[in-house]
Amino acid sequence: MTPAAVMLVALSVAVVVQRLAELRLATRNARWARAEGAVEHGAGHYPAFVVLHTAWLAGWIAEGWTRGPSLTPAWPLWLAGFVFAEGLRYWAIAALGRRWNTRILVIPGRPLVSSGPYRLLSHPNYVAVAIELVSVPMVFGAWLTAAIATMANAALLLFVRIPAEERALRASAPSRT
């Protein structure tokens, strides 16, 4: 196997393992949040994100594989973008603690989190995902997957997810901690 093929397989496995671990954490956190009285908002759009992320994963693997597989000349920069995004994402997850989830689960009356990256950004996890959706495919020159996933993610976030989350948080959390 070529070094590019090894990198494609390794990064694919790493992302799949990461996503499965995050879904497990989200399930555990959802159980806790619901026991604390959390209310779910925007459940109807959740499947669209599942489809988007599944298609993104399959897309960059397939596109990267059919292109050679090969690494783009700028692959170290794209990989650094991915590593940066993962750092930002896990900083956000750590700041939210048990309140982190892939769903919009809000415990009424709890103050909003304003520590960690939330001191700087309203939605650091979404910034991390946006960087990830473009950087990982571009390691392998999978520009079509990067472009489609980035546009679909932006539309879902800007017009559906963030407005639903902001409404839910405004209605349920009176102050920041």
Image: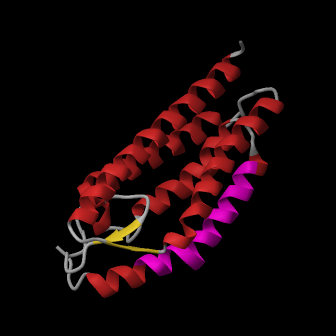
**Residue 122 left/right relative to 119:** right
Magenta stretch: dominant SS? helix
Instruction: Give the residues drawn in magenta, as a range.
Output: 145-165
Depth order, front residue of 112/139: 112
Q: Is residue 81 magenta?
A: no
Q: Quadrant of residue 124?
A: bottom left
Q: Is residue 151 magenta?
A: yes
**Residue 95 in the image: above or below residue 37:** above
Image location (x, y in percent) of residue 35: 22, 63
**Residue 127 in the image: above or below residue 25:** below
Q: Quadrant of residue 7?
A: top right
Q: Is residue 91 visible?
A: no
Q: Residue at x 68, y 56 (%)?
A: 149
Depth order, front residue of 149/43: 43
Q: Quadrant of the N terminus?
A: top right
Q: Residue at x 61, y 42 (%)?
A: 136
